[in-house]
Image (cartoon, helix red, strand yellow):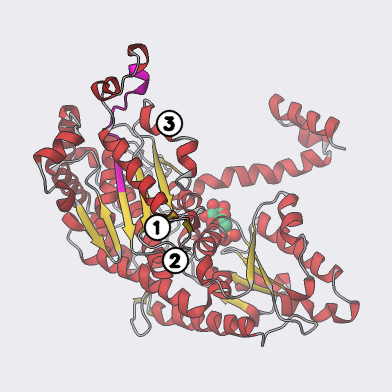
């Protein structure tokens, strides 16, 4: 398939009307489906790496899955996957290759793109990041006054923040290096609170920005540079930035302009999208925290899932199936959102990370050739760790009027085994994970509610309709490798959906307009009367309110 060609319209495939008919006929009855097919759980459970993915509580049967796989073949999922992995420029609107999978190719592998072995380049940078991290972690690299680095502040936003902070939180049990803090927001409160209590002599800043042109990151980097210099004795100031600032970017010239020594800069490439960059040098703060060995395991976990995605027939290809089932929910069953519910506190930032991955990738209305999409795209991803979510929004999941497919994520072994008297607390957590997926799937009928002696007038309020879809992902424990596997799994789910919809999942033009307008509104806030006069009445009134109340 030539990437310049129009994408195949999914609604024009033979599979689409079959899916529409199946959706029309669908009378979901998970209770009956499990009784009638005792092998349903086993047949619909697949393995990818260390992940065990149980799809059996989804509203699918063999006919639906068969039609979804046919749809995937008809739109050329396999060809486009292979084109991505080969380094073709499938990011059409930016004319770029999409090669985050090359970031986790093992040492010694090779992939030539435009005559360049990108895997060799990847390992050259990784080695530099690892060597630097070892120096900091061992205390060989010190601050300008000779003190060991105790805190790393990652300054970045979007993909230069969400991946590293998510993984740093998730891998706390493996964090044996300096503590990390993450500064992202242009709200000056973020800088003030991130720096609060830190000692300039023992703080290292990692300025992470693919473009090195992002307003938030450059502003925060300057604030931190001022804070650093103000907090150090004058005699060492001229040497301080070189010892306390490193940078990660594809724009190494801009790094030098900022005053960071190119020796202390780690590069990556335009073929790594920001939201796909955790495993590039953007992971430097994570490497500082968990060390090169653990980071290598994370990369190996991602690679294992890449290999599964590359080689497994679609019928048992887990990311492909999960992506296709998501398409089924969005386009045929009317789902608008998708909840991700980790029963693991350590994954508390995972849903936020997934929001950028999925929504910046697939929140599009036009296809890669510029024509309008032909089906609904880009569901809203959201979530919170269980059991906290249970006491907040699960009411809507159980009894609301919308289909909300849920992904449960749980681990057999606890990261911190604690007991409450005789009670293994991790078992309480897992009991809740199992209970919620059961309750969503199988519900509680009016007869069952009545049998509990419930007064007739409140029976309806206590009925659970059931047949609310979920996927259960389990792994032995949350390790760096397993985290890498989860990230790669969702990357390829996102890719699969994007291919079906025919959209370029690797651009993000939709974030640009707000940035442009913010640049124009800066002078308005600062008092430029002519610029204010050009604004719409609502904006003018908001600015007037600001003026009146700014103290
Ligand atoms: O890494 P940077 O170039 O600073 O970009 C940071 C983020 O900002 C942009 O607006 C994009 O929406 C994100 O995809 C990107 O991750």
Q: Residues within 10 Å of mark 1 (few under 14, many from 20)?
A: many
Asked if residue 234 is positioned above or below residue 359 in the image, the reply reads: below
> Label 3, label 1: how many angstroms apart (C-alpha)?
40 Å
Q: Is 468 a magenta residue?
A: yes
Query: What residue is rendered at 38% in x and 57% in y?
Result: 491
Question: Badge 1 is on which residue?
Answer: 91
- The mark that comes first in sequence, 3 or 1, is 1
On the picture, is 312 further left or further right than 511? left
Report the residue marked by disc 2: 271
- Look at the numbered disc 1 and give the secondary structure of its residue: loop
Total numbered badges shown on the rendered structure: 3
SS at circle 3: helix
Question: In terms of image quadrants, where is residue 423?
Answer: bottom left
Q: Mark 3 = which residue?
A: 395
Residue 445 percent across, percent down from the top left:
25, 25
Q: Which residues are magenta?
A: 459-471
- Indicate the quadrant containing the C terminus: top left, top right, bottom left or bottom right: top right
Q: Are marks 2 and 3 in contact (CB under 8 Å)?
A: no
| Residue situated in front as seen by the camera: 86 or 163 | 163
Kindly indicate the quadrant of the structure image that contains residue 58. top left
């Amino acid at each position: 398939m030539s990437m310049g060609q129009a994408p195949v319209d999914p609604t024009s495939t033979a599979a689409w009307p079959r899916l529409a008919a199946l959706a029309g006929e669908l009378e979901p009855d998970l209770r009956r489906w499990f009784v009638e097919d005792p092998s349903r759980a086993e047949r619909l459970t697949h393995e990818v790496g260390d992940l065990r993915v149980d799809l059996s509580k989804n509203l699918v049967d063999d006919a639906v899955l068969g039609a979804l796989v046919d749809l995937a073949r008809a739109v050329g999922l396999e060809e486009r996957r292979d084109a991505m992995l080969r380094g073709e420029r499938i990011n059409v609107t930016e004319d770029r290759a999409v090669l985050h999978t090359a970031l986790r190719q093992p040492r010694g592998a090779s992939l030539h793109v435009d005559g360049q072995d990108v895997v060799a380049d990847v390992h050259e940078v990784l080695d530099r990041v690892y060597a630097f991290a070892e120096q900091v972690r061992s205390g060989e690299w010190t601050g300008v006054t000779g003190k060991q680095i105790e805190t790393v502040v990652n300054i970045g936003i979007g993909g230069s923040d969400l991946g590293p902070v998510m993984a740093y939180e998730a891998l706390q049990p493996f964090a044996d290096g300096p503590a990390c803090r993450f500064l992202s927001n242009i709200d000056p409160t973020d800088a003030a609170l991130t720096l609060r209590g830190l000692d300039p002599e023992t703080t290292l800043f990692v300025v992470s920005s693919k473009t090195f042109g992002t307003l938030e990151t450059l502003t925060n980097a300057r604030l931190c540079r001022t804070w650093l210099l103000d907090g150090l004795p004058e005699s060492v100031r001229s040497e301080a930035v070189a010892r306390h600032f490193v940078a990660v970017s594809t724009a190494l010239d801009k790094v030098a302009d900022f005053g960071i020594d190119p020796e202390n800069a780690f590069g990556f490439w335009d073929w790594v999208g920001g939201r796909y960059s955790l495993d590039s040098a953007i992971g430097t703060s994570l490497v500082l925290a968990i060390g090169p060995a653990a980071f290598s395991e994370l990369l190996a976990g991602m690679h294992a899932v890449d290999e599964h995605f590359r080689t497994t027939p679609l019928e048992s290809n887990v990311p492909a199936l999960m992506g296709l089932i998501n398409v089924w929910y969005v386009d045929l069953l009317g789902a608008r959102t998708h909840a991700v519910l980790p029963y693991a506190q350590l994954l508390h930032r995972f849903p936020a990370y997934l929001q950028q991955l999925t929504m910046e990738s697939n929140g599009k209305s036009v296809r890669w050739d510029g024509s309008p999409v032909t089906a609904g795209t880009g569901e809203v991803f959201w979530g919170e760790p269980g059991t906290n979510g249970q006491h907040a929004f699960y009411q809507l999941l159980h009894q609301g009027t919308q289909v909300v497919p849920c992904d449960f994520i749980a681990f057999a072994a606890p990261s911190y085994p604690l007991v409450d008297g005789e009670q293994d607390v991790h078992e309480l957590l897992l009991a809740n994970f199992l209970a919620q997926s059961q309750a969503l799937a199988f519900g509680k009928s009016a007869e069952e509610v009545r049998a509990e002696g419930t007064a007739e007038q409140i029976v309806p309020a206590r009925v659970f309709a059931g047949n609310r879809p979920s996927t259960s992902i389990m792994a032995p424990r949350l390790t760096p490798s397993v985290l890498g596997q989860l990230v790669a799994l969702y990357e390829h789910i996102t890719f699969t959906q994007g291919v079906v919809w025919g959209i370029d999942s690797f651009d993000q033009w939709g974030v640009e307009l707000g940035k442009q307008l913010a640049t124009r509104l800066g002078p308005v806030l600062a008092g430029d009367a002519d610029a204010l006069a050009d604004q719409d009445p609502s904006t003018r009134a908001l600015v007037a309110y600001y003026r009146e109340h700014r103290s």
